[in-house]
Image (tube, rainbow, N blue to C red):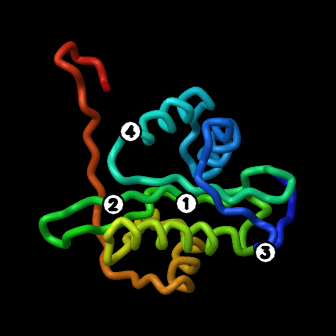
Amino acid sequence: MTHNSEPAKLKIRRARSSDAPQLAELTAQLGYPTTTAAVSQILRKMKTGGPNALFVAECPAKQVIGWTHVSVAHLLETGARAEINGLIVADGQRSLGAGALLLDAAEAWARKHGAREMSVRSRIERERAHKFYLRQGYDHYKTQKAFRKFLRTNAGKIL
């Protein structure tokens, strides 16, 4: 992805199924290698899932140069809270305004869905991303450890 784009010329829109190849490429840049087929399947599931949205930044050449996924959860301890589940801007396109525009779209969507606050998690080594979120008005309020368990079916296969 080599196009330089001014923020004013970027279009922020909801992701479409036809974006899957570019979304897969960007997701790999984020550190999560995937395939176009896997992204297509996730996009289909997102349409029927809970309140969530996937926004893309599209340059004038119709190339997707970034995406953000936002969701709202209704939590007992905080009520409606939105979370940025992922945000990536392509190598060579960073620090040009696409990330801020994507974040603005996610925040507007979250407000519309009743969220009073927005959270984002960022891996400890992503110092550039941390500085970005601080510039966008986010506060670093907690450091925690993340735990994960892969769920298996009764037959022992990982879901």
Q: Which mark is residue 48?
A: 4
Distance between mark 4 and mark 2 Cα atoms: 14 Å
First in sequence: mark 3 vs mark 1: 3
Q: List x then y, in percent, for residue 55.
A: 57, 56
Amino acid type, mark 2: Val
Amino acid type, mark 1: Leu
Q: Which mark is residue 47?
A: none
First in sequence: mark 1 vs mark 2: 2
Amino acid type, mark 4: Thr
Q: Residues within 10 Å of mark 4 (few under 14, many from 20)?
A: few
Q: Residue furthest left?
A: 76
Q: Residue furthest top?
A: 155
Q: Nearer the viewer, residue 27 or 71?
A: 71
Q: List x then y, in percent, for residue 73.
A: 27, 59
Q: Residues within 10 Å of mark 1 (few under 14, many from 20)?
A: many
Residue annotated with mark 2? 72
